[in-house]
Amino acid sequence: MPEYHFLLIQNNQETAEEEIFQKIQEMAVPTYKMYAITLNNENTTYVSTREEAEETINKMKEEQANQLEEIEIGMQEIYTQDRENIQSTVEVASAINETEVKLTEIVEEQTKRKLATLDGVYFEVKPVSGTITSRFGANESIRDHTHKGMDIAAPAGTPIKVAADGEVTYAGWMGGYGNLVIVSHGNGIQTYYGHCSKLYVSKGETVSAGDTIGAVGTTGYSTGNHLHFEIRKNGSQINPQKYLYK
Ligand SMILES: [Zn+2]
């Protein structure tokens, strides 16, 4: 909207209508209105009118009732001075298609997340990619008890990434583990990363899922380069493959 000011000039002053009109034209910036369809408050697609936005949302609610149980669909009025933005609007049928595709993506992501969550801790990142050489609960000749973690073979020096956000509560030598990093994730959940050749973090450090905390090695009680990975709940090891490397 242009801004208007009323100015008192002179009682007997004649106004030049033509000039005023021309000035307004010069200074006016055309502004266009369009509507975004939103899923969980993120824009997914754009339509030209409120009616089209409502139609899209109503159709989605009819056809995708199940999927929309935990995801909020809505619209947002958008003002733009860029004509190209307006040209990115689509017809209702395409808007529905695009919103459906995005909805499926969000639902899949949420499902994945649910499956990888333990007491509110989200195991987002595989610490290393490589061959699983020993699983949780395996009996092997090298040990006189069952395996309480999982082993992933990888070349020496391969970066080890932390599986979930947390705080380093141990980084150093610990018996058969060799060089070990322990990360606490809250709610009594911890992860262990054993046999490291190098440690890149120290106790007290805050880490985010995906941060490199060490390098694969064969320190401690180990017969080759691999990561020994554990998930513990209140001190007891649980099967990591319930959450990662499924
Ligand atoms: Zn192991």
Image (spheres, grey):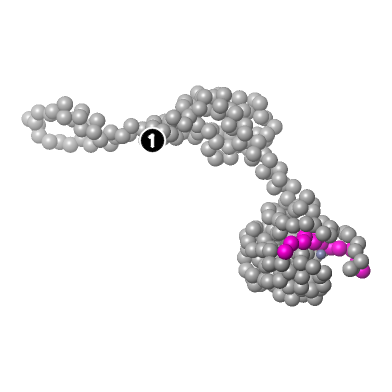
Q: Quadrant of ligand 1?
A: bottom right
Q: What residue is drawn where x is 82% and y is 59%?
A: 133
Quadrant position of residue 92: top right
Residue 37 visible: yes
- Front residue of 246/225: it is 225
Q: Is residue 151 covered in magenta?
A: yes
Where does the image place residue 220, in percent across and percent down from the top left?
Answer: 79, 74
Dot 1 surroundings within 10 Å: few (below 14), some, or many (20 or more)? few
The residue under label 1 is 82
The residue furthest front is 155
What number of labels is visible?
1
Quadrant position of residue 41: top right
Above-or-below relation of 156 to 20: below
Q: Regarding mark 1 in the picture, which secondary structure is present there?
A: loop
> Which quarter of the rendered picture does the N terminus lie within?
top left
Q: What residue is drawn where x is 71% and y is 59%?
A: 128
Q: What stretch of residues is rendered in magenta? A: 144-155
The residue furthest left is 12
Residue 240 visible: no
Q: Is residue 164 covered in magenta?
A: no
Above-or-below relation of 87 to 197: above
Q: What residue is drawn where x is 71% and y is 67%?
A: 156
Q: What residue is drawn where x is 67% and y is 30%?
A: 65
Where does the image place residue 14, in percent across and percent down from the top left?
Answer: 9, 28
Quadrant position of residue 70: top right
For the stretch drawn in magenta, the main secondary structure is loop
Where does the image place residue 15, in percent across and percent down from the top left?
Answer: 12, 29
Where does the image place residue 238, in percent across and percent down from the top left?
Answer: 82, 58
Q: Is residue 23 left or right of residue 238?
A: left
- Front residue of 183/173: it is 173
Going by the numbered disc 1, the residue's amino acid type is Asp
